[in-house]
Structures are given as C-alpha cells and as structure tokens.
C-alpha cells in the first residue's frame, strides 16, 4: 500500500511537471515579489502606463505556492527557473505562475542567500551568486542534468553585494549591480572576474531586478534617490549610468527576468516632423534575439490615409516586396540573429496633422507569439504607434524688412527639410547673403504647396566727418574739433577718443569738443544713429615740442623792486618744476624749492639766506623740469647777486 501511494505521488508529480504550460516569449518583463514572512512569492508582468509615467504590475499569480528568487527565462523550453534564496531549492514556473519544486541542486551550498540569478542564453545553466558564505563563488546549475548538479567558479571579489544579474541576449555578457559599491558590474561566469570599471551611481541603493529587452537594452527595478524599491530604471551598458524612467508599486524581496530571445519590431520616422507632401524615411528595425535564423517572416504596414509609399531604400532580409499607395508588404523574409533595418521612403499627406500607425511582423514561431506589433522606441510605452507630424509650409520665420548700415549684409537661412527653394535670381540656395539694399524674393514649394516671401533691404547709412584732417599745435596747446553729419543730431550718439592716453578730451560725447594732446596722435569720432549704424572719422594732430626754459643771470636784491627775484620761466610745454636748488661758491645750499609751476616769481629766490641778505657774488643753480609729455631734464646755470 505504501509502495502504491509512493508511486501515485511520484506519478502525480510527473503529471504536474508535464502539465505546466510554457510562456510565449514576446519580450515581456516578469517580476516576483516575496513579502515579509510569506511562504509563497507572487508573479507579475511589468506593464508601463499609457502616459509612460508609471509602472503597473499585472498579476499572473498572487500565490505561486513556493518562494522564488534568482529567476531567469530559459528560451529552450520557455519556462522561468529560480531558487528559494533561503533553502536553495530549485523552482520551475509556467505561464500560469505556478512554481514547481525541482529539489535541491546537487552539491549546492546552503550557507548563503541566493538572490542573483539568470539562465544562460543557450538555456544550459541557471547562474546563481549568493550573498554571504565563503568562499564567494558562482554556482552553475545544470538544467539539462536530471540531478541539476552544480559546478562552481570562485569569484575574485570575496564580498560582492550583487542581488541580481542578467545576460545580454546578443553579447552574452553577464551584468549585475553591486549594492555595496553602488555601481554596475560585469561578471565573467567562466573565470569569476568582476569588472567594476563603471561610474558609481550614489542615487541607486539596490536593484533587485535586472532584465534586458529584445534590442539589448538593460533595465532595472529598484531604489533611486530613496530607500523605496519602486523605480523603473534605464541602464547604460557602456558607462554604467543609471537613469530614472518611471515609478511603480513599492516592493521588497523582488526579482525579475525577461524573455529577450524573440523577434521584435521598432518603427521610426525620420524626420518625425515634416511639411505637407514631403518625404520621410520609415525605418523598420528588426531584432532577432532568438539565436536562430527565422524564415517565412512577413512585414506589413498600412500607412495613414494620404501617405504614399515611393520606394524601398534598404532591405537586408530579402523576400517578396509589394507596395502601392499607402500599403507595403514584404513576404518570406529570412531574418538572421542580430539587429538590422528596412528603410522605406514615404510621401506624407497634404493635410496638416499628427498621424499615428503601427506595422506588424508575422510568421513568428508559436513559442515567440506568432506576430508582434511595432514599437516606437523613443517612449517607454510598450507597443505604441509611431508619430509623424505634418505641418503647412510656413515662411513667417523669415524677416521681410531689414534696415542695414553701410557695408553690412543680411544672412537668410531657409533650410526646411523636403521643401524646394528658388530665389528671384534663379538660385536654389537654402542660405544666402544679401549684400546690397533692394528687393529680393524667395519661393518655397512642395508637391502641393507654394509660399512666397518678399524681402526688402533699406539703406540706413549716415555720413559723418570731422571738419579737418590734420592739425599742428605746440605742446600744451588745445584745439577744438568739430563734426558734421547728414542727419538729425538728436538721433545720434557721439564718442570721441584717442589712440594715446596722453591726451585730454573735455566732452567725449558732444558733437564738438576741445582736446589737449601731449604727443602727436590720432583722434577718432564714432557716430551711431538710432538704427545702430556706425561711422568713424579721424583727425591727426601733430604736436610740436620746444623745450626752452629761461632764467635771469643777475638779480639786484637791493629792495628797489626791480629785478629782485630769481625764478624760471618758459612756454606752455613745461608742466612742472620738480626741484630747484641754489648753492654758494663754497657749495652751501642757500635755497631749495620743488613741485611748482613756471613763470611764478613767488616760487623763486629773493637773494636771502636764513632770513638775511645773502652775500653778493656768483651762485650756481640746478633745476629738474618735467614737460607735459612726461619728458624730464636737468638744467643748470649761474646767477650773480649784486646790491
């Protein structure tokens, strides 16, 4: 009886395994959640909301019957395999979300927690990395062995904080996120090497679920800028940069996997904003991640009403091409593993508006879903339509009236994609310099529209001049400069300036000004009118320099008021007497003064020494003089004092 009961149980178990329904691989994302103290996990399909802002979890089974983590999708039988992180028992999940226990893999250590797992692209192994335990190692569970025996590869890092991993469906590279180092890593499952040469991402604490889409893009579900495990993330495989895409339900004890091993279709319009009756290029990007050549594949698309298919630019898949008006079909294509593109030229409608549509890929194996709709890759919404916006030809961005100054030009750029341009001179240039005042005309046309814009250039030049060209003056003299313009002085701005700092300008913003140059130089006048037009004129002022200082050679000092004082005199070119000293014949200093102007008797010597009349005789004087142009010189002489 006990033997019969055991055989019945064994038979029921086999039937249970055999009765499991495989998934259909269509690029879906799956997420398992294990709530605290729960004895069973929940299985969901990850869905993105219609506005692309939120993540929804569509329930597959809210009670899988067993705890499952470390999940991976196996393309060879279309089941999900995972493990109980606490007990290390192997699980197999079917499309109904029921988990079946496959027992303890042969040789697997149970001294660690198994959260990180994925199935190799060839379906042979479930790769597991545990937290804790020593030594740190990769466990490779052989899914083709009835005993699910394990082999092990030591990890080069003995303390990795990796809680999920995912294989790139095209390169086979294994990616993970190290929560201790807060960065992405790649792991070599054959050598145990861990590559950490990625940018740290301090905003990301933990990614409990990693998965690839069928185009080789990497995503995650975990925490971002908070401890809540509720963010859908995009991951750059080259740099390791992690970006926030959307928000979903809060989770803990989560794991994820995907089935990227299928055929998927993306549809892109270039450009996606065009003018009526112009051409766009539709790119149909086909990804085959199934690992095998797929034959008998059909691409079909019915474009929006008013669109017209003109030609097929590129078709790497062969097949029978048929197109007319707005419909295209390519039958019996052979699609090898990898990603490539079909390109089709289409003329858009003559009616402005936003147009949406999708293409269909048929002839897929039943296990891959038989058919799939195209996806617009520039939104995170799944299987959404590709937009094209059709605009009327509009030339209002081109200015029609210009006021230009003398010597100026106007640059006109009319680079509208798909629109033909012709100027009044027959030129088809999309960019043109207009150099002279006058009238110009530009015509823009498509197959159904024509727009004309007239452009006028008006001359706003002013004429301004300084009434003289060259002036000669002596150093220290000033001169008045006068301007003349052909306009209204109240509407212009004046600026006088010189090419040297050794000058003075009394009124730099007047029509007339007085200047005092201390060396030969040019003086300039800028005149700017209300239109911003600038005209400049100049005058050269030549400064003649005479360095003559006069001093008496005899003074009386007798109090009669005639020739009583020794002082220096000279022309306007001298700026200052820095020092003047007088010595007697024995070399005694009898007088000293400094920093005074010439031609002032009050600054001179009156023939006294220490308040008393000095002795008559011959005295020697020395003076240091600075001229207005900053030139300095020493001069000396004798003075005779008589009574």
Image (spheres, rainbow, N blue to C red):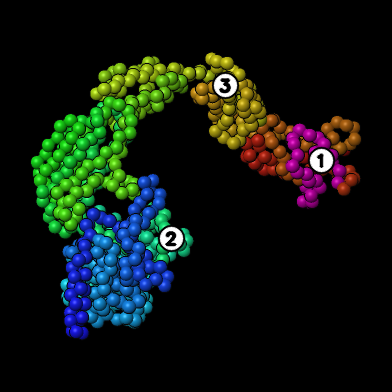
Q: Secondary structure at mark 2?
A: strand
1 or 3: tag closer to the N-terminus: 3
Taking the spot 28% from the left edge, 63% from the top edge, the residue there is 97
Residue 643 rendering spot, x and y as whole percentages: 87, 38
Q: Quadrant of the N terminus?
A: bottom left
Return the residue at label 2: 250
Quarter of the rendering containing residue 540: top right
The answer to which of 430 and 85 lies nearer the viewer is 85
Asked if the magenta segment contains residue 595, the reply would be yes
Q: Among all residues in the image, which is located at the extreme front?
A: 1
| Mark 2 residue crowding within 10 angstroms, few (<14) / some (14–19) / many (20+) | few
Q: Secondary structure at mark 3?
A: loop
Taking the image as drawn, is residue 374 in sight? yes
- The disc at residue 605 is 1
Report the Cα–Cα distance between label 1 and label 3. 56 Å
Residue 313 rendering spot, x and y as whole percentages: 16, 38
Asked if the magenta segment contains residue 396, the reply would be no
- The disc at residue 492 is 3
Q: Nearer the viewer, mark 1 or mark 3?
A: 3
Where 313 sits versus 60, above or below? Answer: above
Report the Cα–Cα distance between label 1 and label 2. 102 Å
| Mark 3 residue crowding within 10 angstroms, few (<14) / some (14–19) / many (20+) | some
Where 438 sits versus 472, above or below? Answer: above
The answer to which of 583 and 511 lies nearer the viewer is 511
């Amino acid at each position: 009886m006990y033997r019969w009961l055991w055989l019945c149980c064994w038979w029921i178990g086999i039937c249970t395994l055999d009765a499991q329904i495989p998934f259909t691989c269509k690029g879906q994302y799956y997420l398992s959640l294990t709530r605290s103290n729960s004895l069973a996990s929940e299985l969901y399909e990850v869905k993105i909301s219609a506005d692309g802002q939120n993540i929804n979890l569509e329930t597959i089974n809210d009670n899988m019957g067993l705890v499952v983590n470390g999940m991976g999708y196996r393309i060879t039988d279309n089941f999900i395999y995972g493990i109980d992180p606490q007990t290390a028992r192997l699980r197999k999940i079917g499309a109904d979300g029921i988990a079946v226990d496959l027992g303890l893999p042969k040789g697997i250590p149970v001294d660690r927690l198994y959260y990180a797992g994925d199935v190799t692209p060839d379906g042979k192994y479930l790769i597991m990395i545990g937290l804790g335990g020593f030594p740190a190692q990769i466990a490779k569970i052989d899914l083709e062995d009835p005993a699910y025996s394990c082999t092990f590869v030591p990890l080069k890092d003995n303390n990795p904080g990796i809680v999920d991993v995912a294989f790139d469906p095209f390169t086979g590279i294994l990616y993970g996120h190290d929560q201790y180092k807060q960065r992405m890593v790649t792991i070599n499952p054959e050598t145990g090497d861990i590559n950490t040469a990625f940018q740290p991402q301090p905003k990301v604490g933990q990614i409990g679920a990693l998965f690839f889409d069928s185009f080789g893009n990497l995503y995650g579900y975990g925490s971002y800028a908070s401890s809540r495990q509720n963010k859908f993330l995009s991951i750059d495989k080259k740099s390791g940069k992690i970006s926030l895409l959307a928000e979903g339900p809060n989770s803990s004890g989560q794991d994820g996997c995907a089935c990227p091993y299928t055929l998927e279709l993306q549809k892109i319009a270039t450009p996606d904003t065009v003018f009526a009756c112009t051409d766009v290029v539709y790119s149909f990007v086909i990804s085959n991640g199934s690992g095998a050549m797929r034959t008998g594949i059909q691409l079909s698309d019915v474009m929006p009403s008013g669109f017209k298919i003109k030609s097929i630019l590129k078709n790497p898949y062969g097949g029978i091409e048929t197109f007319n008006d707005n419909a295209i079909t390519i039958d019996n294509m052979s699609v090898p593993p990898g990603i490539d593109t079909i390109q089709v030229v289409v003329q858009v409608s003559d009616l402005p508006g936003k147009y949406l549509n999708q293409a269909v890929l048929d002839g897929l194996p039943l296990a891959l879903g038989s058919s799939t709709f195209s996806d617009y890759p520039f939104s995170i919404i799944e299987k959404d339509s590709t937009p094209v916006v059709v605009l009327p030809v509009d030339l209002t961005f081109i200015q029609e009236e210009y006021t230009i100054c003398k010597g100026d030009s106007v640059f006109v750029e009319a680079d509208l994609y798909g629109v033909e341009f012709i100027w009044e001179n027959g030129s088809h240039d999309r960019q043109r310099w207009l150099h002279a005042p006058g009238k110009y005309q530009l015509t823009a046309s498509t197959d159904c529209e024509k727009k004309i814009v007239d452009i006028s250039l008006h001359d706003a030049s002013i004429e301004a001049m300084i009434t003289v060209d060259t002036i000669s003056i002596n150093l220290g003299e000033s001169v008045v400069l006068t301007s003349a313009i052909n306009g209204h002085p109240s509407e212009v701005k004046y600026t006088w300036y010189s090419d040297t700092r050794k000058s003075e300008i009394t009124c730099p913003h007047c029509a007339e000004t007085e200047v005092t140059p201390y060396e030969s130089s040019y003086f300039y006048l800028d005149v700017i009118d209300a239109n911003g037009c600038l005209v400049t004129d100049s005058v050269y002022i030549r400064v003649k320099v005479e360095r003559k200082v006069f001093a008496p050679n005899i003074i009386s000092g007798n109090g009669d008021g005639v020739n009583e004082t020794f002082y220096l005199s000279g022309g306007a070119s001298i700026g200052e007497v820095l020092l003047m000293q007088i010595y007697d014949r024995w070399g005694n200093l009898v007088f000293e003064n400094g920093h005074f102007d010439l031609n002032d008797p009050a600054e001179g010597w009156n023939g006294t020494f220490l308040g008393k009349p000095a002795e008559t005789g011959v005295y020697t004087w020395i003076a240091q003089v600075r001229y207005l142009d900053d030139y300095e010189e020493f001069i000396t002489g004798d003075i005779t004092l008589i009574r």
